[in-house]
Image (spheres, rainbow, N blue to C red):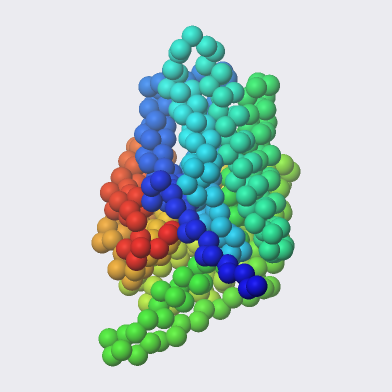
Amino acid sequence: MQSISLPSKPPSAPHPILNLSFRIFFSAGALFAIITMSLWAFIFTGKTNIDAQTLNPLYWHGHEMIYGYALAIVAGFLLTAVKTWTGVMMPYGYKLLGIFVCWLLARLGWIAFGLGIDVGIEQSAWLYIAAVFDLLFIGSMAFVIFRAVLQVKQYKQMGILAKLALLTLGNGLCYWGIMSANMNMTKIGVYLGFYLIIGLVLTIGRRVVPFFIERGLSIPNAAGVAETVTVRNSKVQDIASLLFFFVFFIIDLFYPNKYLLTITALGVAVVNIVRLMGWYHRGIWQKPLLWSLFIAFLGMCLSFLLYALQPWLGYNHSIAVHGLAIAGVGMMTIAMMSRVSLGHTGRSIHTPPKTLNAIFGLMVLVFISRVLLPLVDMNHYSLWIMIAQGAWIACFVLFCSSYLRILASPRPDGLFG
């Protein structure tokens, strides 16, 4: 007797924002970018009751930009991309909500600590609470990705999993340093997380930026003729970029040596400048979803040059750090969110919101004000920082006004996603 296989029940979620991870994590990450930078502006000017003896306010800011904002965007991207790469369904609905709530509760703990909220417990207790949920968040995200990769034996994704494992370690070091009153340990945890995020950006960017450029430009022109655009990539460049970057961040974090730092930072910059030349096409300037990615990589290259020159010119190391953070985390993530949020909700990437040029322009202003202007005028350093903070907040306010409705609405084609 022949058996009949009934079709499986299609996935469903209680709300479209829980369909796939990019929806809820991009939305929350963008809102958090506004909240955490606004709070940092108050902390920076001494307007909160943060306990500086428990945690250096600079590390509060660094931790939440890396393990709060950046890791939320990484979670949204990876938990969506792994579904595409492996064909294995990622968490959605209430399972996705559970992962997200862990991230959210950790952020609330850090916000409470930053505000100095007193509810009859030691202020540092907020960070103990945050530690539990932060590690649950990273651990659950890594677990579902690892399970999907093993299921289809896509062992080439193990590099990304290794970075997630090290991010868990870095976050653990942050909390260990706080709990043991070892500020140097906290610093190592923050910088380890930062460089791992940059490593992820370089790895994932090498995969998706050329793809986005080719897809974004290979469309019919005014005459109805489709121009096929192909950009150049090189395995040698991939290996060289990875090796130079790996040695660079080990040197900068653990074994400071100005000669090796200059050589390795220059190596990363030169390799990726050559890579950008192979990706360049004049048509990108007509499409903000493309020029933003190009400018993000270019800003990273410039920042590595700043690392290389810093030991010899004597400006503050944090200028190079913030250059790499603004280009590699700020510009790259908001450019990726803007593109992915359209494509994965069934909307055309060729007709994006008209606000994109302003959104990306504001992030460029953040880079200019926080990185370039202090190089030439340190007398107004606080002013440049406040302008950068304002531009960052305005950038994400504009992004939220343009994209939150898209991220919270069903796909126009009625499909799940």
Identify whether 173 is placed above or below 361: above
Residue at horizontal 50 percent and vertical 82 percent from the top: 230
In the image, residue 177 lies at what x, y percent?
Answer: 66, 27
Q: Position of residue 100 (x, y in %)?
A: 50, 40
Q: In the rendered image, which quarter contains the N terminus?
A: bottom right
Residue drawn at point x = 40 percent, y = 63 percent: 415
Residue 108 horizontal side relative to residue 400, left or right = right
Res 287 quadrant in image: bottom left
- State which quarter of the image contains the C terminus: bottom left
| Residue situated in front as seen by the camera: 323 or 108 | 108
Residue 111 picture quarter = top left
State how many labels appear. 0
Q: Is residue 135 visible?
A: yes
Q: Nearer the viewer, residue 189 or 372?
A: 189
Q: Is residue 239 above or below residue 253?
A: below
Seen in the picture, residue 398 relative to 416 is either above or below; the reply is above
For the residue pair 286 and 270, the one nearer the viewer reads as 286
* 377 sits left or right of 132 in the view: left
Q: Position of residue 266 (x, y in %)?
A: 62, 60
Left or right of 146, for residue 284? left
Up the image or down, 260 lies above or below 136; here it is below
- Camera sees residue 259: no
Q: Quadrant of residue 262?
A: bottom right
Residue at 55% from the left image edge and 28% from the top image edge: 130
Residue located 71% across and 58% down the image: 150
Q: Residue furthest front?
A: 1
Residue at the extreme left of the image, as rendered:
354
Where residue 64 sits: x, y (%)?
A: 50, 36
